Amino acid sequence: MDLAVKEGTITTLVGSNGAGKSSALRAMAGIIKTEPGTVTVHGEDISTLTTRDRIIEYGVVLIPEGRSVFTTMSVAENLHLGARVGNERSKHGHAATFTTEEAYDLFPVLKERQHARAQTLSGGEQQMLAIARSLLMSPRVLLIDEPSMGLAPLLVRKIFGVMKDVFARNSVSVLLVEQDTSIALELASDAYLLEHGSVIAHAPSAEMRNDSRLREAYLGKGDALGRTQGTGNA
Amino acid sequence: MVVELLSYLFAGLSLGSTYVLVALGFTLIFGVMGIMNVAHADVFMIAIFTYLLITTGFDLPTGLGVVIAIFAGALAGLIVYWLVLKRIDKGHPVALFVSTLGVSYVVENFIAKRINFGRPSLEPIFGSDPIIVGGVVFTGPRLLLFAVTAILAGGLIFWLKKSETGMLLRAVSENAVMARVVAIDTNRVTMIAIAVASFVAACGGLVVGNMTLTADAFVANSLSLKMFAVAVVAGIGSVGGATIVGLTLGVIEAFTVAYVGSQWQNVIGLVAMTVVLLVRPQGLFGRVLRVG
């Protein structure tokens, strides 16, 4: 599997269930081993680093799929876990790009519920919390796994609409894995099509979206919106 | 009648305090590492024997004995971590269970052999004349045990809830993979948890030893059974739950011994554990099942 993410852009990985999308993200974050592949950020090889070092030194931040907040902790505590990483990164010379106040401005509901346990939040609010927490970690490369899982497409568009500005302002490179291909291709500028752990196509997402052959073959048959039919985990 | 009931209540609370001081660390280690460290109760015993060695063996002051014993207990916990817990694949819980059991046997029998399987007496750390309030007898060592239990259990709960390190520890306990995702140094957090858990158990050994005034190399045998039952009934990983369940178990045991018969003492904990595992496997105070 060979893929690259341009600085400051959103790139998406699409493909059917089991194509290796989530595994690719986890390998890049160092949660699972990448042998024999390599992961580079700005030309520097980070394959041998721990997840922690990838975050602190290179700003490679993963938002795992599903319920990726600490549910027994409060909203404020979850955000604090992100902010402390941002602080640590600024000590390593990577100035913090995002503050807790900005997170609250971006997602006002989080401010209202800051003392509530994260498990009492709705699915969409939990996803906002996970995203806000990751932004507080001053990411340079953000790996987002299935943000729309269990959420209404409208809500996902809304969350990403808000975030696109933040990404652009801080030149965050985003690699997005998403079951809902129509949303993914709409948000991303670049797309990779994966099958059985290999890249089988790479194109600007607009082009991928209009390629009826690819859509028929890999992105869900017959659906005019190009949505995949599976909802399980990749 | 009331005096009798109160006497049993306080006897039960002191028994329960002993369970709490061991179960707290056991449950803390389980929370962070997801493994059952059967050898944890031996830290309790190691503190007692270190104290014996310093005070009786080297004839040094009791205060020094206390400090060195606590330090030795915490160190013993960390050594078990470095030598065993860290090296065995967490994917094989049975291997971990058996190896910590092995550590427990080796350490206990090694120490027992050194003292020719005797039960030497300990010099008191802190004693006083009994205080009698309305017919109920309080002894200095028992009050010390209550005070130490209250301070350590309360302090631990407060520390977990309010401190930065406590927050990291809770994060690792809830989900170790997610903790890595937010750049938590899980190795460092685990070592802190082990050191704190062992510190609490070592303090427990000293204040209980101060009551019994004997050093028994096999004290951990019955204690680890109770530690296990308390942690499971409370919901493994729940520190507040372990405190409540530990004290309750002690009180129930004391009343059982008084009114039913001492042969039933050790049965209660096991029955409670079985029932809880059948109806509420996450334990009375367990909120979520652990991930990772």
Image (cartoon, coloured by chain):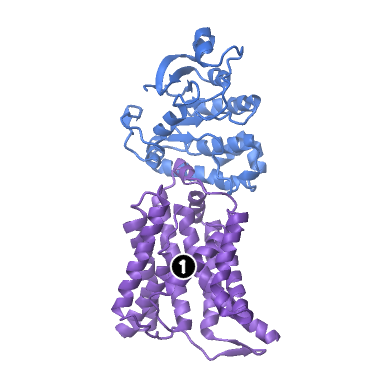
Chain colours: A blue, B purple
- Helix, strand or loop at disc 1? helix
Identify the residue at horizontal 50%, vertical 51% (top origin). Answer: B173
Q: How crowded is mark 1: few (under 14 residues within 10 Å), some or many (20 or more)?
A: many
- Quadrant position of residue A114: top right
Q: What residue did someone put label 1 on? A: B224
Quadrant where the image shows the N terminus of chain A:
top left
Q: Where is residue A8 in the image (x, y as percent from the top left)?
A: 46, 24
Q: In this view, does A221 lie above or below B54?
A: above
Q: In this view, does B158 lie above or below A49?
A: below
Could you tell me if residue B114 is visible in this image?
A: yes
Identify the residue at horizontal 44%, vertical 63% (top origin). Answer: B196
Q: Position of residue B258 (x, y in %)?
A: 61, 81
B258 or A182, which is in the foreground? B258
Identify the residue at horizontal 31%, vertical 85% (top origin). Answer: B59
Residue B115 in the figure: left or right of residue A158: left
Q: In this view, does A35 lie above or below B192?
A: above
Q: Which chain carries label 1?
A: B
Residue that protrudes farthest toward the right in the picture: B1
Q: Where is residue A201 in the image (x, y as percent from the top left)?
A: 43, 14
- Quadrant position of residue A66: top right
B137 or A166, which is in the foreground? B137
A22 or B281, which is in the foreground? B281
Could you tell me if residue A173 is visible in this image?
A: no
Q: Position of residue B194 (x, y in %)?
A: 42, 60
Name which residue type carries label 1: Ser
